[in-house]
Image: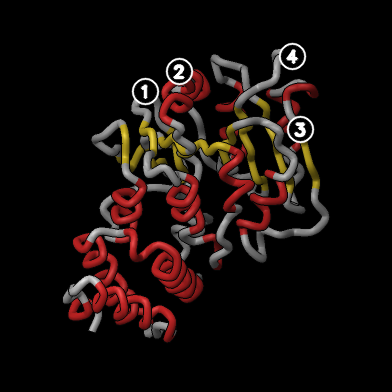
């Protein structure tokens, strides 16, 4: 690593060793080496150091072993614990089974000027979903170079866009301000990070590279034995967004939120809190809207 202060921290919360070698190999293969690598071992039963040392010199990474497993309680706790160590202006949280193409860091630095000029706190990249054998099974890209944070969140609520944590880089000051919402399984926590950190309503979308995101039977996204927790997390996500940001959305966007909330409530059998009901109906009354029909 060069001696100058890096602007970018790549943070890997480590627990699963299954595809970790591919992850480390992709980080070590970056053409632009101007980044700091942080690896936090969440008390994994599998020692990652032999793999790390196979591809990286001792001064090319910072390794933290934690005796207490926090990821089992909530992944967001593990993310925050590692982020407490970084000093760089920007950070990426890379899954321990995801991969980067060799021009990823280079593409980030090519975007720095635009990020700083526009005061943007989030840069997002296209995603390629890969399976256990590294076959690309799905990919997604937004069609714009700049995305409104409201547009982004609506695309997640109505399931029209793919998004996960690894294909984003965040400005560290945004993390220090908002931290990370700790929904069960950290389900939707990344959506909230993107939305809240992009507080000036702009997300830069860089289509010069992408991120490989792994789908396997060990992914939380793929598992079917955690459906109840995912539904609880989705309920908490809707509750949080409505409590803090509902009034900022357009009437068309509110309609989408309510239609999808109604669908969620129907299938999950969750109920709305009185506070959430009050916010929705009060907003409808104040603005003369007739959106309650999308919820009732």
* Residue at the far front in the pictured view: 286
Is residue 227 visible from the viewing direction of this image? no
Decide which of tag 3 and tag 1 comes sooner along the chain.
3
The x, y position of residue 181, in whole percent, is 56, 60
In the image shown, does 124 or 128 lie closer to the viewer? 124
The residue positioned 61% from the left and 57% from the top of the image is: 75
What whole-number distance in Å separates the C-alpha atoms at marks 4 and 1? 27 Å
Indicate which label's residue lies in the foreground, 4 or 1.
Answer: 4
Give the labeled residue for mark 1: 208
Q: Are marks 2 and 1 in contact (CB under 8 Å)?
A: yes
Q: Are marks 3 and 4 in contact (CB under 8 Å)?
A: no
Decide which of tag 3 and tag 4 comes sooner along the chain.
4
Q: Residues within 10 Å of mark 1 (few under 14, many from 20)?
A: some
The x, y position of residue 246, in whole percent, is 35, 65
Is residue 186 visible from the viewing direction of this image? yes
The x, y position of residue 17, in whole percent, is 65, 45
For residue 62, the mark is 3
Relative to 156, is 112 on the left or the right? right
In the image shown, does 196 or 77 lie closer to the viewer? 196
The residue positioned 76% from the left and 53% from the top of the image is: 43
Give the labeled residue for mark 2: 110
In the picture, the quarter occupied by the N terminus is top right
What whole-number distance in Å separates the C-alpha atoms at marks 4 and 2? 20 Å
In the picture, the quarter occupied by the C terminus is bottom left
Indicate which label's residue lies in the foreground, 3 or 4.
Answer: 4
Position of residue 178 relative to residue 34, above or below, is below
The x, y position of residue 179, in whole percent, is 60, 53
What whole-number distance in Å separates the C-alpha atoms at marks 3 and 4? 15 Å
Indicate which label's residue lies in the foreground, 2 or 1.
Answer: 2
Decide which of tag 3 and tag 2 comes sooner along the chain.
3
Relative to 8, is 249 on the left or the right? left
What whole-number distance in Å separates the C-alpha atoms at marks 3 and 1? 28 Å
């Amino acid at each position: 690593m060069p001696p100058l202060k890096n602007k970018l921290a790549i943070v890997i919360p480590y627990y699963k060793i299954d595809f970790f070698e591919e992850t480390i190999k992709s980080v070590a293969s970056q053409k632009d080496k101007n980044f700091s690598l942080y690896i936090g071992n969440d008390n994994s039963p599998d020692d990652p150091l032999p793999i790390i040392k196979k591809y990286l010199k001792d001064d090319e990474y910072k390794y933290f072993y934690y005796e207490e497993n926090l990821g089992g309680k909530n992944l967001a706790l593990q993310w925050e614990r590692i982020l407490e160590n970084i000093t760089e202006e920007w950070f990426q949280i890379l899954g321990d089974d995801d991969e980067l193409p060799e021009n990823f860091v280079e593409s980030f630095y090519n975007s720095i000027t635009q990020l700083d000029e526009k005061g943007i706190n989030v840069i997002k990249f296209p995603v390629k979903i890969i399976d256990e054998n590294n076959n690309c099974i799905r990919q997604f890209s937004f069609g714009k170079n700049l995305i409104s944070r409201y547009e982004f969140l609506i695309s997640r609520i109505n399931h029209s866009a793919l998004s996960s944590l690894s294909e984003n880089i965040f400005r560290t000051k945004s993390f220090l301000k908002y931290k990370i919402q700790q929904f069960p399984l950290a389900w939707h926590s990344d959506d909230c990070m993107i939305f809240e950190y992009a507080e000036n309503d702009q997300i830069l979308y860089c289509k010069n590279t992408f991120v490989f995101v792994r789908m396997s039977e060990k992914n939380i996204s793929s598992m079917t034995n955690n459906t109840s927790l995912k539904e609880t997390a989705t309920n908490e996500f809707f509750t949080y967004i409505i409590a803090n940001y509902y009034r900022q959305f357009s009437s068309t966007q509110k309609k989408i939120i309510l239609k999808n909330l109604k669908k969620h409530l129907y299938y999950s059998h969750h109920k709305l809190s009185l506070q959430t009901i009050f916010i929705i109906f009060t907003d409808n009354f104040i603005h003369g809207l007739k959106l309650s029909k999308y919820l009732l």
